[in-house]
Amino acid sequence: MAQTLIAAYETIEKDHYAHSFHSYFLRPGQMDKPIIFTVDRIRDGKSFTTRTVKAIHI
């Protein structure tokens, strides 16, 4: 979850901070496989920003 939050933070301006975090685990993780994080920019507003991050095993 922390890696997902960091991936989202890499796409926003420095004056915005996380105040809400929702996560869904659809499948079990596999520690021996690398993870690719994709970030979808849903909204870039003046007061808040919305991102969707997907963690995908290769």
Image (spheres, rainbow, N blue to C red):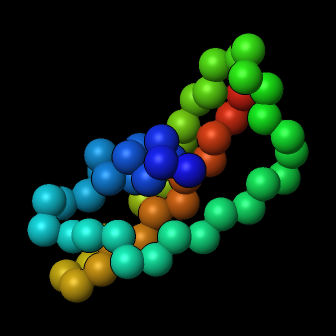
Residue closest to the far right: 27
User: Which residue is rendered at x = 18% and y = 60% of the image?
Assistant: 13
Picture coordinates of residue 22, whole percent (x, y): 60, 70
Picture coordinates of residue 51, whole percent (x, y): 46, 63
Q: Taking 32 as reference, is 53 left or right?
A: left
User: Which residue is rendered at x = 19% and y = 82% of the image?
Assistant: 46
User: Which residue is rendered at x = 78% and y = 54% of the image?
Assistant: 25
Q: Taking 47 as reference, is 34 left or right?
A: right
Residue closest to the far bottom: 47
- The quarter of the image holding the C terminus is top right
Q: Can residue 43 be seen in this view?
A: no
Q: Compared to 32, does 41 lie above or below?
A: below
Depth check: 51 or 1 in front? 1
Q: Can residue 15 be seen in this view?
A: yes
User: Which residue is rendered at x = 54% and y = 37% of the image?
Assistant: 37
Q: Taking 25 as reference, is 54 left or right?
A: left
